[in-house]
Amino acid sequence: MSKEKKDGSAGIKAEIKEMREHLMSQQQTIRAKNLPIIVLVEGWAAAGKGSLINELISELDPRFYNVTSPVITPEAEARYPFLYPYAKAIPENGKIMFYDSGWMEDCVRKYLHREITREEYKKRIRAVNEFERQLRDGGYLLLKLFVDIDEDEQRRRMSALRENYETEWRVTAEDLWQQREYKEFKDCYESFMEKTGKLLPWHVLDGSKKNLAARDALRLLNGQVEKALEKGRYCGKPFEEDFPLLKMPKLASVDLSPALEDEEYKKELKKLQKRLGELHNVVYRKKIPVILCYEGWDAAGKGGNIRRVARPLDPRGFDVMPIASPEPHELARQYLWRFWTRLPRSGHFCIFDRTWYGRVMVERLEGYCSEDDWKRAYNEINEFERQLTDWGAVVLKFWIHIDQDTQLARFNDRQNTPEKQWKLTDEDWRNREKWPQYEEAIDEMLKKTSTENAPWFIIESNDKKYARIKTLRIVIQALEKAIEAQL
């Protein structure tokens, strides 16, 4: 080997060492400034993705980074939306997450395997762009790397791995298939990067020269970290996509007089619960996920309404998720994370008692997020819900509505009944004082987020019996429609 080559190789290794140490020195600043970082490493089988990640993490404090391979999806997680394992793995503020393959590999392999249609593939591309933009707008630094090798190099590396008893396990049937279909994969990878690289660009590394790939990756990561630390966390500006919205009335115009007599209520409740129980069996067999979202005024009757809907369901096939103020580990991530992690498996029900709409109500009015944050959330929520319905979920949203006089009467009843006093808090009284501000925020929420795929229903609940029957009828009708669509 020539002296020039030795010197060049030594120079690259010295540069790698220096940059690794610099990245390590930045970790405490990353933590102090609450900067969450995602490094997505995609690329060819046998291109050296794992080796590259090892180079990037070798000097880092392991308490503040993680490596995940979410593209290797257990069967249980395969029953969630395709972005679920990637959304679930996003890091807390101040930490770094390295993805060993991710949404690119997932989309491309399933498309080339013909496991998803062209139309489904297009929807996934759209979802990826939305997911990446939401992460960026929420303050995440996202670096996307693709480790490239040519067809001959891949064949040579796979052959070497397969000839060694200790390493042959590393070449899977999927990898061999990719090698045989190299050109088709190459076209699909390039197309994917073109369609998902406009907002956050892809960086292609030469995987045939491992030291050069490591140096270039470290340069990119250090450079972007320094820029982010200097400028501070990014906060996206609000914008509105043209979603197909349903016309919603203002709350003040809703007639709250509908009521049911006891006898009629009992008869209808028995009939509707029986039908819902039957439909649950069909939903489970057809693997249709069902997401019911409850919001409403304090003391409006959400709990009793939820109990009547849940009563006929098989307890093994549903969960009720009461959503309170976020815990510290939830506050430390993008706000939709705690809902991604609570989604039901296909064929199951999930009933949310309070939802992601807290972003545009309590968080907006109590100043828990910036104005840009809550204004941006309308579009982010519509995107999130569209991803759920693209997955096949039935998404129904109920605003449980009462007037102020009814709320006051129920507050007083709770206050004067010992076994109900736990339901009434000082916060309930404070929120009541802000009724006009909340009503304005709710009207805007209903107007901007009642979409054709995930509609809002205003449930008149001055009479709780009427509210329960109306909700059951809506759920049953939606399930029957979803089941019929699969026939």
Image (tube, grey):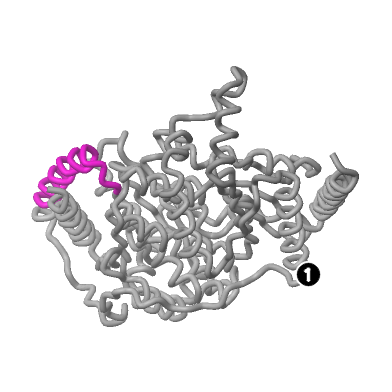
Task: Count the numbered circles shown.
Answer: 1
Q: Can you give x and y, in whole percent of width and height, for residue 68 in the image?
A: 59, 41
Q: Can residue 283 be found in the magenta stretch? A: yes
Horizontal side, residue 374 vs residue 181: left or right: right
Residue 410 appears anywhere in the view: yes
Residue range corresponding to the magenta coloring: 266-289
Q: Can you give x and y, in whole percent of width and height, for residue 278 in the image?
A: 15, 40
Q: Which amino acid, by three-letter code, is at mark 1?
A: Glu
Compared with 404, 485 (above or below) is: above
Compared with 66, 330 (above or below) is: below
Q: Can residue 281 be found in the magenta stretch? A: yes
Residue 412 appears anywhere in the view: no
What residue is rendered at 31% in x and 49% in y?
116
* Residue nearest the observer in this picture, 330 or 458: 330
What residue is rendered at 37% in x and 61% in y?
385
Q: Can you give x and y, in whole percent of width and height, for residue 349 in the image?
A: 31, 45
Q: Residue furthest top?
A: 165
Horizontal side, residue 268 vs residue 178: left or right: left
SS label for mark 1: helix
* Residue nearest the observer in this picture, 273 or 10: 10
Q: Residues within 10 Å of mark 1 (few under 14, many from 20)?
A: few
* Residue nearest the observer in this picture, 416 or 333: 333
Q: Can you give x and y, in whole percent of width and height, for residue 440 in the image?
A: 42, 80
Residue 405: quadrant of the picture:
bottom left
In the rendered view of the protein, which quadrant contains the N terminus? top right
Compared with 102, 121 (above or below) is: below
**Residue to which mark 1 is pinned:** 230
Q: Residue furthest front?
A: 2
What residue is rendered at 59% in x and 43% in y?
100
What residue is rendered at 66% in x and 55% in y?
37
Magenta span main SS: helix
